[in-house]
């Protein structure tokens, strides 16, 4: 079952900002009540709605779901303390989820390798995302030797290697980011494993793979860096991310640089018209 199912849960917001919740349990058989609860954690209110829903289920004398299908793990990108006074945000979120009484939490391709260790009372089951990346890449890979993987930073190398193996690609091009040490702002990109133009002419499809895409500035910046160095990949490059946040016109902007874009529905839903119009390949991690 899903937290956003209007047949099961009703939510509203009071003038003071508080979240109201009602579990619509009439007619449900406690013995047949679903034991998995799927949640798109795409708002600061999501964790509050989840907590309210779990309490409402308990008060209805229904056996509570034991598995939380989370998909996207909020705050996984805030997995360390950078400066004095910072919170360890990933641990804060894990504690909140721990307190809700689930036996397991299922997460797709969490940004941080320490995500599992952040939980104390809940068993974490990680889906590395290989199956979903494979489904996106398989029809674009005729001859693996004529394909290449662009790795957007050092942290993405392990993920990229795992996903590339599923389709037999062994060509990797590593990119590094030049950041402002004080602000963390990306100042530019450096292609570490660049090849000659003759080599690039043999490459028919290029995949840029990562876990999360917000507005896509990093990915478009990498494509521009290649273009500035005389390598135009726009008609043969494909972007795949496990979690597509894609605010506003992000997909339209990405499609100026990528022949196709792929993701899952862990963070949001995409209607069929949007997928077809924008050549956006969306897989349903949960229904």
Image: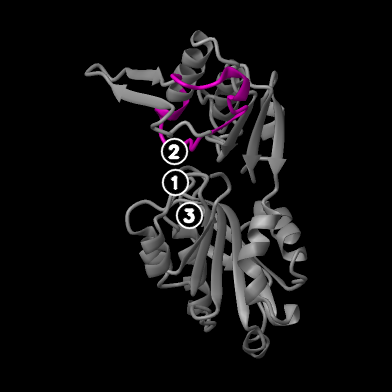
Look at the image and tell me whether residue 211 can be seen.
yes
- Left or right, 286 with respect to 118, comes to left
Q: Quadrant of residue 164?
A: bottom right
Find the magenta span and give its range. 25-47
> Is most of the magenta stretch helix, strand or loop?
loop
User: Is residue 65 part of the magenta span, yes or no?
Assistant: no
Mark 1 packing: few (<14 Cα in 10 Å), some, or many (20+)?
Answer: some
Upstream in sequence: badge 3 or badge 2: 2
SS for callout 1: loop
Residue 48, percent across and down?
A: 44, 22
- Closest to the observer, 31 or 139: 31
Task: State the residue at coordinates (70%, 20%).
Answer: 120
Q: Which residue is mark 1?
A: 268
Towards the viewer: 229 or 7: 7
At a point 70% along the width and 55% down the height, the residue shown is 130
- Mark 1 / mark 2, whichever is N-terminal: 2
Rendered position, 258 above or below 214:
below
Q: CA distance from mark 3 to mark 2?
A: 25 Å
Spatial separation of the CA atoms under disc 1 and disc 2: 7 Å
Q: What residue do we see at 65% from left, 83% from top?
A: 203
271 vs 286: above or below: below
- Give the residue pinned by disc 2: 42
Task: Answer whether labels 1 and 2 touch (C-beta < 8 Å).
Answer: yes
Label 3 sits on residue: 186
Q: The residue tagged with tag 2: helix, strand or loop?
A: loop
């Amino acid at each position: 079952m899903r937290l956003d199912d209007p047949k099961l849960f009703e939510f509203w917001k009071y003038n003071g900002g508080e979240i109201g919740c009602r579990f619509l349990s009439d007619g449900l058989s406690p013995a047949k009540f679903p034991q998995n609860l799927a949640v798109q954690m795409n708002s600061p209110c999501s964790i509050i709605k989840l907590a309210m829903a779990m309490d409402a289920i308990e008060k209805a004398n229904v056996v509570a779901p034991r598995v939380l299908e989370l998909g996207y793990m909020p705050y996984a990108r805030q997995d360390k303390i950078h400066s004095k006074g910072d919170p360890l945000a990933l641990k804060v979120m894990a504690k909140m989820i721990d307190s809700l009484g689930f036996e397991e939490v299922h997460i797709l391709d969490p940004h941080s390798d320490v995500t599992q260790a952040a939980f104390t009372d809940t068993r974490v089951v990680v889906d590395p995302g290989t199956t979903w990346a494979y489904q996106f890449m398989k029809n674009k890979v005729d001859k693996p030797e004529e394909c290449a993987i662009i790795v957007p930073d050092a942290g993405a190398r392990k993920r990229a290697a795992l996903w590339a193996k599923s389709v037999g690609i062994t060509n990797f091009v590593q990119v590094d980011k030049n950041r402002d040490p004080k602000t963390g702002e990306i100042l530019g990109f450096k292609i570490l494993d660049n090849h000659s133009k003759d080599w690039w002419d043999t490459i028919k499809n290029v995949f840029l793979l990562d876990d999360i895409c917000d507005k896509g500035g990093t990915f478009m910046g990498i494509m521009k860096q290649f273009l500035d160095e005389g390598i135009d990949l726009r008609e043969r490059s494909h972007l795949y991310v496990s979690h597509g946040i894609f605010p506003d016109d992000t997909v339209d902007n990405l499609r100026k640089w990528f022949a196709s874009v792929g993701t899952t529905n862990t963070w949001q839903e995409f209607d069929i018209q949007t997928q077809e119009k924008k050549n956006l390949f969306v897989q349903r991690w949960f229904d």
